[in-house]
Amino acid sequence: MTELMGQGIELMFVGMSVVFLFLTMLVIAINGMSFLIQRFFPDQPINIKSTSAKINTPDKAVIAAITAALIMHRNKK
């Protein structure tokens, strides 16, 4: 019985060691790939001036038409 218990504990430690080594190698591989991607494909800076110029504000006539349409829709109910 004690020999069987010893083999079970040995198997447990071997299994836990294999899982620990696999997870350690996985973390190292992910960090390595992250480093390579950041080194060869750096993030491009975002030009805020060009993106803010694309935003169009609606005219006052459009706002008035939308407001009138909402008022008419709410008054129907």
Image (cartoon, grey):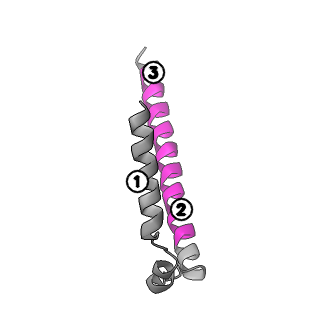
In this view, the residue in front, 38 or 65, is: 65
Question: Where's residue 3, x and y in %?
Answer: 45, 21
Which residue is at 46% across, 55% downward?
66
Residue 9 quadrant: top left
Which residue is at 43% across, 33% downward?
76
- Label drawn at residue 30: 2
Question: Where's residue 34, x and y in %?
Answer: 53, 69
- Label drawn at residue 13: none
The Cα atoms of the two marked residues, 2 and 1, are separated by 53 Å
- Label drawn at residue 3: 3
Q: Secondary structure at mark 3?
A: helix
- Which stretch appears magenta? 5-34
Q: Secondary structure at mark 1?
A: helix
Which residue is at 49% across, 74% downward?
56
Which residue is at 40% across, 38% downward?
74
Please report contact status of discs 2 and 1: CB closer than 8 Å, yes or no: no
Q: Looking at the picture, does residue 17 appear above or below residue 47?
A: above
Instruction: Give the label, 2 or 1, closer to the camera.
Output: 1
Q: Looking at the picture, does residue 14 appear above or below residue 25?
A: above
**Number of residues whose C-alpha sits closer than 10 Å to that of mark 3, classed few (under 14), some (14–19) or many (20 or more):** few
Q: Amino acid at mark 2?
A: Ile
**Number of residues whose C-alpha sits closer than 10 Å to that of mark 2, classed few (under 14), some (14–19) or many (20 or more):** few
Residue 52 quadrant: bottom left
Question: Where's residue 62, x and y in %?
Answer: 48, 63
Q: Secondary structure at mark 2?
A: helix
The Cα atoms of the two marked residues, 3 and 1, are separated by 84 Å
